[in-house]
Amino acid sequence: MHRMDPAPELAFRRAMGAFATGVTVVSAAQPDGRLVGMTVNSLTSVSLQPPLVLWCLGDKSARYDAFASVEHWGVTMLGADEQKFAQRYARSASQDIPPADAEAFAAAYVLRAGVAHLACRTHDRRVAGDHLIIIGEVVDFRVKPGAALTFFRGRYGRAEDPGEEQS
């Protein structure tokens, strides 16, 4: 059903919210040694050969400078019980990752939490509309069992691990 809305951006956001996604935290080390994180649900696989993923960074994001030019970054795919991390790194005031919550993985840093991790090296950057598309080559990855955190229509949910036996 198409609906006219006086705020087209809000209407478009609502329409895109009907697409269920996983929830990730993208993380990167800064030149001063701080680790920063950002909740992202725009992660997309691009290619298998070479292994490429992309995510989108808003040009008005409080974290734009922290992520727009980094060469190495990590992705933590959050587990169903890790909503606190999604909420923490969605707020612009809480972008620093405490050292106890992170670990080095290949050439990147990831959260100790999560059901999967990717270590990426920036492959390309493209401006599209009001976002910077960051394409990364996956240099290493690992997967753990467990249910995943999801986001649908503005709410968090869970997707059960089909490999785990349900009780």
Image: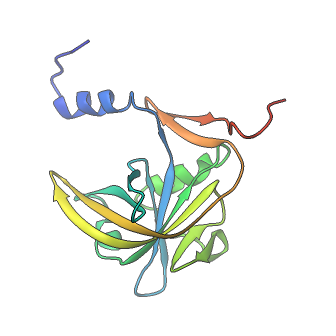
Furthest residue to the front?
49
Please give the name of the residue rendered at 54% of the width and 74% of the height, measured from the top-left corner: 109
Furthest residue to the top?
1
User: 119 above or below 80?
Assistant: below
What is the quadrant of residue 7 in the picture?
Answer: top left
- Image location of residue 39, percent across then percent down: 46, 54
- Image location of residue 30, percent across then percent down: 42, 81
Furthest residue to the right?
167
Quadrant location, the N terminus: top left
Please give the name of the residue rendered at 67% of the width and 35% of the height, measured from the top-left corner: 160
User: 4 above or below 152?
Assistant: above
Please give the name of the residue rendered at 53% of the width and 55% of the height, measured from the top-left corner: 88
Pick whichever, 4 or 133, lies toward us. Answer: 133
Pick whichever, 68 or 97, lies toward us. Answer: 68
Colour convention of the picture: rainbow
Pick whichever, 105 or 89, lies toward us. Answer: 105
- Image location of residue 153, percent across then percent down: 43, 29
Q: Is residue 109 left or right of residue 2?
A: right
User: 153 above or below 53?
Assistant: above
Pick whichever, 84 or 1, lies toward us. Answer: 1
- Image location of residue 89, percent across then percent down: 49, 57
What is the quadrant of residue 150 in the picture?
Answer: top right
Q: Is residue 164 left or right of residue 54?
A: right
Quadrant location, the C terminus: top right
Furthest residue to the bottom?
32
